Amino acid sequence: MALTGDQTLTLHALEEAMWRAETRFDHAFMERILDPLFVEIGYSGRRWTRAETLDLDPMDIDVRLPLEDFAAVEVVPGVAQVTYRSTPDHGVRGAALRSSLWVLTDAWRIRFHQATPTPT
């Protein structure tokens, strides 16, 4: 079964919320959307746990929104893979190809995220 249009829009909004300081550093919001088993492999190759992600200090987020080349597909019922490109507006860090796995329980929760640096 494919994702509905509404599910795709929801996943797109949730991914973009991760790039907005007002939601990314809202502890209650992040508690709700990070799956208990969340793990991230960041742009630098560092592995981040859920606890480390929740403990991040607020900072400026430099990314062009809307996210570029956004796509969402259902992998199996209740699990979606989201892919997109993140491009900074003015920072020194370059673009990255990104992939997230979202699990649908009572709501969509992000289980895994990975960033891979790309030249453009």
Image (spheres, helix red, strand yellow):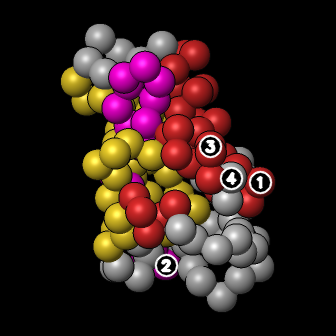
Instruction: Inspect the magenta stretch and tell me whether residue 114 lies in it.
Output: yes
Say which element carries label 4. Answer: loop
Q: Amino acid at mark 4?
A: Asp
Magenta: main secondary structure equals strand
Three-letter code for the amino acid on which mark 1 is drawn: Glu
For the residue pair 98 and 35, the one nearer the viewer reads as 35
- Mark 2 and mark 3 lie on one chain; the one further toward the N terminus is 3
Q: Position of residue 114 (x, y in %)?
A: 36, 61
Count residues near mark 3 (Cα–Cα under 10 Å), then give few for <14, some for 14-19, many for 20+.
some
Above or below, 46 relative to 49: below
What residue is shown with label 3? 29
Marks 3 and 4 close (CB-CB < 8 Å): yes
Q: CA distance from mark 1 to mark 3?
A: 10 Å
Q: Looking at the picture, which amino acid does disc 3 mark?
A: Phe
Quarter of the N terminus within the rendering: top left
Q: CA distance from mark 1 to mark 4?
A: 6 Å
Residue on which the image places disc 4: 26
Packing grade of label 1 (10 A; few <14, some 14-19, many >=20) is few
Q: Residue at x 43, y 36 (%)?
A: 109
- On the rendered image, what quadrant is the C terminus found in? bottom right
Q: Position of residue 105 (x, y in %)?
A: 36, 23
Looking at this view, is 9 or 69 the one in front? 9
Residue on which disc 1 sits: 22
- Residue interval drawn in magenta: 102-119
Q: Are marks 2 and 3 in contact (CB under 8 Å)?
A: no
**Residue displayed at 34% across by 52% down:** 38
Disc 2 crowd, CA 10 A, few/some/many (<14, 14-19, 20+): few
The residue that disc 2 covers is 119
Q: Is residue 63 above or below residue 5?
A: below
Question: Element type at marker 3?
Answer: helix
Residue 119 on image: x %, y %: 49, 78
Q: Are marks 2 and 1 in contact (CB under 8 Å)?
A: no
